[in-house]
Image (tube, helix red, strand yellow):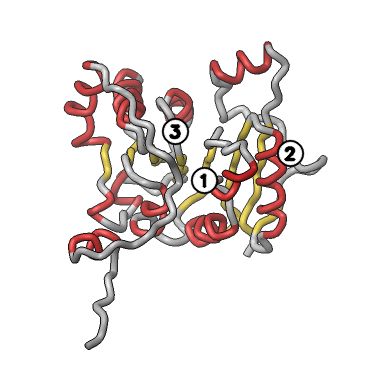
Amino acid sequence: MTEQKHTSVEEAKADGKYIRTIKSFVKREGRLTKGQQASLDAHWPTMGLEHKNGLINPAELFNNDGKLILEIGFGMGASLVEMAKNAPESNFIGIEVHTPGVGACLSSASEAEINNIKLYEHDAIEILGDCIPNESLDTVQLFFPDPWHKTRHHKRRIVQPAFVESLRTKLKMGGVFHMATDWENYAEHMIEVMNAAESFENVATNGDFVERPEHRPLTKFEQRGHRLGHGVWDIMFKRIK
């Protein structure tokens, strides 16, 4: 008797199988406010995307051929919405697992009256594998991911060789992977992983890091950090093969 092969995690689970998968997050669910729930109810039908629907067609989704920017872990969505508002000619897809953040982002996007943003509430690893076409992304953004600062937890950091390879296949040639972190040790880890990825080249021309580009908004979190003397490291690598 041959073992049945499953084409997706969902099919395996439905068949009663357990498959160990790597997660890009640890879900720490907060409490939804009434406003966030109202935004989910009102705007998810037009701005929300579902993992179960599989591969997207960006040109059909946004009704144009603009640049496609994917942000992993957008938090409450303030900077994502600001970037989308400032670049109406580009299209933005955000991925976040925390429902309150998704609700807050939907609310902000609605208030800004923008229509160039779509959201997933799902694990980024699975979205990349199942929903994003190869060579479709101009930019992937990963801003202030969980640093997993304890040494024994470093293996949980999302920036690892296998993750970078999954991004490579989704980025266009010349597409950019833009990271930012306020943990120097994680910044060094990011540089180490990216330098080992032969298909990427550091955009920085003076050292390993770049100045915060104008298109990445300065968050309240960063402003507070600057006042306290904390550093922030921006890292940009482009796909070269």
Q: Is residue 176 visible?
A: no
What residue is pinned by disc 3? 74
What residue is pinned by disc 2? 209
Which quarter of the rendering shows the N terminus? bottom left
Residue placed furthest toward the top: 227
Work out how far the residue at label 3 is from the one at label 1, CA to CA, in angstroms: 12 Å
Work out how far the residue at label 2 is from the one at label 1, CA to CA, in angstroms: 17 Å
Image spot of residue 15 (x, y percent): 19, 66
Residue placed furthest toward the front: 152
Q: What is the quadrant of residue 99 in the picture?
A: top left
Q: Earlier in the sequence, mark 3 or mark 1?
A: 3
Residue placed furthest toward the right: 206
The secondary structure type at the circle numbered 1 is strand
Q: Earlier in the sequence, mark 2 or mark 1?
A: 1
What residue is pinned by disc 1? 140
Q: Is residue 149 visible?
A: yes
Left-right relation of 140 to 76? right
Label 1 is placed on what type of residue?
Val
Count the labels in the image.
Answer: 3
Q: Residue at x 24, y 59 (%)?
A: 10
Q: Earlier in the sequence, mark 3 or mark 2?
A: 3
Q: What mark, if any, has residue 81 been given in the picture?
A: none
Left-right relation of 193 to 86? right
Image spot of residue 158 (x, y percent): 53, 47
